[in-house]
């Protein structure tokens, strides 16, 4: 069993050899690609193949290709409007065209996972982060859009990740910058913000991403990223999600400004996450990995729980082999 399966890392082009060696030695759950990686599509296809081999043949290769302002692949790649564009028009045919085309081009590069759909319901009109990224301001329209999106990506052989639980649509601070606090009550979460996530779970969404906010009505003591109440008791047990739960980027300001990386990894795993996403800082990646590995070797974390997390990650990777669409579209 390799502890690296618990991690999804981003990397700069100059750090590729480091990441390949890490995957070979420790295993690796996944990688996330950014525009910095996608300048040369021929190069990235080659890098993906080499990382796959280093990781033992199975690797979650992900990207944020939402449309509109969030497109990581741009050069020689078809681009589409934002989720809000489609939601405002209830353009489900357009969503299918976008997802089908994007899936085909992602798979041609060896990218097997798109970190969509955005399931957040935009209830705070001053929330500029989610203004275009959300499909809309009601759970009904968001739910219809995300179900269409998941269905089309799955037909195209691409895994999906619903985000950002328990809902970022009421936030007033961008988690990329610092921690946001929301005071909406638990009934509002359940009635409005959780409905698209419930629909995504019912549609067999592959992964689910949490967000770095404090939701006082759910857990007054902990940020969601470190909250066993939210991640395990609500998302895993109450909503019944059986797939892989991943953090949002632990390099975001909400985390990096307030918590040391060695504590973040252990707290997030303890809350119930299966994978830790660290996008930009190699030193933080090394620190987080070493803290988990040391705690595992010294039995300071439950080895059975770690084994269960790795089992879920490997089960997710098996979809890449078993799903006919993945095989057909692979590089």
Image (cartoon, rainbow, N blue to C red):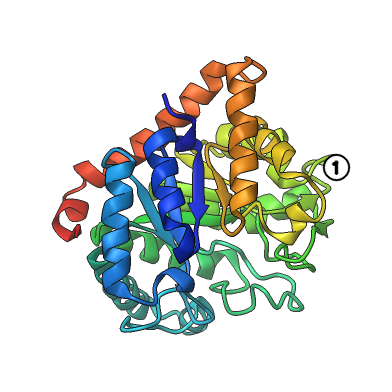
Residue toward you, 321 or 140: 321
Residue toward you, 321 or 250: 250
Left or right placement of residue 248 versus residue 224 in this view? left
Q: Quadrant of residue 103?
A: bottom left
- In the rendering, at what x and y percent does residue 99 appear? 33, 71
Within 10 Å of disc 1 (Cα), the crowding (few <14, some 14-19, many 20+) is few
Which image quadrant: the N terminus?
top left
What residue do we see at 76% from left, 66% from top? 177
Residue toward you, 209 or 264: 264
What residue do we see at 40% from left, 75% from top? 73
- In the rendering, at what x and y percent does residue 83 appear? 49, 76
Q: Is 86 located above or below residue 296 in the figure?
A: below
| Viewer can see residue 272 | no
Q: Quadrant of residue 92?
A: bottom left
What residue do we see at 27% from left, 45% from top? 53
Residue toward you, 182 or 173: 173
Left or right placement of residue 316 versus residue 322 in this view? right
- In the rendering, at what x and y percent does residue 31 appear? 44, 53
């Amino acid at each position: 069993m390799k502890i690296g399966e618990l991690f999804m890392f981003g990397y700069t082009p100059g750090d590729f050899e480091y990441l390949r060696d890490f995957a070979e030695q420790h295993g690796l759950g996944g990688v996330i690609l950014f525009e910095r990686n996608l300048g040369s599509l021929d190069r990235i296809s080659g890098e993906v193949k080499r990382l796959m081999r280093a990781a033992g043949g199975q690797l979650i290769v992900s990207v944020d290709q939402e449309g509109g302002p969030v497109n990581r692949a741009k050069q020689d790649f078809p681009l589409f409007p934002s989720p809000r564009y489609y939601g405002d028009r209830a353009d489900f045919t357009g969503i299918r065209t976008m997802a089908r085309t994007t899936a085909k081009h992602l798979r041609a590069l060896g990218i097997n996972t798109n970190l969509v759909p955005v399931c957040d319901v935009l209830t705070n009109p001053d929330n500029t982060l989610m203004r275009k990224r959300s499909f809309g301001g009601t759970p009904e329209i968001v739910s219809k859009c995300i179900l269409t999106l998941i269905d089309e990506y799955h037909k195209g052989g691409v895994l999906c990740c619903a985000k950002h639980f328990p809902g970022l649509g009421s936030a007033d601070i961008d988690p990329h910058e610092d921690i946001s606090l929301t005071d909406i009550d638990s009934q509002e979460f359940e009635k409005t913000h959780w409905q698209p996530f419930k629909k995504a779970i019912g549609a067999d969404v592959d992964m689910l991403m949490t967000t770095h906010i404090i939701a006082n009505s759910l857990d007054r003591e902990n940020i969601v990223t470190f909250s066993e109440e939210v991640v395990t008791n609500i998302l895993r047990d109450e909503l019944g999600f059986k797939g892989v739960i991943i953090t949002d980027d632990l390099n975001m300001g909400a985390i990096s400004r307030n918590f040391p990386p060695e504590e973040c990894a252990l707290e997030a795993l303890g809350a119930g996450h299966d994978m830790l996403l660290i996008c930009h800082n190699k030193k933080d990646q090394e620190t987080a990995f070493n803290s988990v590995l040391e705690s595992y070797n010294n039995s300071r974390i439950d080895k059975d729980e770690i084994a269960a997390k790795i089992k879920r990650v490997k089960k997710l990777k098996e979809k890449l082999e078993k799903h006919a669409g993945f095989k057909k579209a692979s590089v």
